Amino acid sequence: MSRPATPEDIAAKQDFMNAYFDEALERVAFVERLAAEGRQVESLTLCLVYLDGLSQLLSWPGRETGRNFVETLCSHDQADFLSLVHPLQLIRAFDTMSGPWPSRARALEGRYSGPPYSLMSCTEASNAIGETFASNDVAEIVRELWRGTVAAVVYHWMRNPSVHGFGGSQRISFDETSLKGYPAPPLSLHTLLPPLRAMLSEARKRSLARCEWFGDDRIILPAK
């Protein structure tokens, strides 16, 4: 039977945690140095790998890798760009799913027959879903709106090729897509570094608040 942690134990563990997260911030600084040296592929790949790892840790015990990545990225983007919904991304995502989803994609295609397209907030997208589909389908469809976000574009076109392949797109432009009447900005390393720092800050905060890694030591300890 283990003894209760003493104040000295807690202080030592917190010191170790702070050292860990300080070193993690150094990794982010290294990513920035790589980019400044022109190593765009390597810097973006490292950034995406770090984002993926942190999103899974911060989403524990959630097991949906894609959802974890997208929703965590969205919630740590202070610019609120990554949580916007692109109609075409949503249509394409629903088309790849089974059951009623391809027919739902066709209904959305009828409503959003672009190009051109406009990025929408999740609230605007939810309202559009409510106007397009039967009431008993709305909640299920809204739950899957994450698949149509800009962050989902990051997951499918940047993260997946970088983690499972030999590098993905270094910059993604949204052709014929507007945001509040202006051309939508592109996706790049510059878009992703602020959420990465915010996720590290959140991880440190959770760890120190309870003196447990990422808020719960079970996240990193093997199951017994």
Image (cartoon, rainbow, N blue to C red):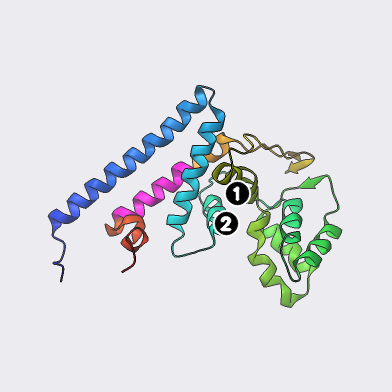
Task: Residue under label 1, please give it.
Answer: 155
- Graded by Cα atoms within 10 Å as few (under 14), some (14 to 19) or many (20 or more), the crowding at tag 1 reads many
Helix, strand or loop for the magenta stretch, by majority: helix
Q: Say which mark, if any, is on residue 66.
A: 2
The residue that appears at 26% across and 57% down in the rendered structure is 211
Q: In the displayed structure, would residue 69 be above or below residue 222?
A: above
Residue at the extreme front of the image, as rendered = 165
Mark 2: which secondary structure? helix
The residue that appears at 40% across and 50% down in the rendered structure is 202
Q: In the displayed structure, would residue 73 be above or below residue 62?
A: above
Left or right, 165 with reference to 20: right
Residue at the extreme top of the image, as rendered = 37
Distance between mark 2 and mark 1 Cα atoms: 7 Å
Residue type pointed to by label 2: Gly
Residue 80 position in % (x across, y down): 59, 47
Decide: marks 2, 1 in contact (CB < 8 A)?
yes
Residue 40, magenta (yes or no): no
Whether residue 193 appears in this view of the structure is: no
Residue type pointed to by label 1: Tyr
Q: What stretch is highlighted in magenta?
A: 196-208
Which comes sooner in the sequence, label 2 or label 1?
2
Please name whichever residue, 57 or 123, is drawn nearer the observer in this view of the structure.
57
Residue 75 position in % (x across, y down): 53, 53
The residue that appears at 84% across and 45% down in the rendered structure is 115
Residue 35 position in % (x across, y down): 51, 27
Q: In which quarter of the image is residue 174?
A: top right
Query: How many labels were placed on the picture?
Result: 2
Residue 202, magenta (yes or no): yes
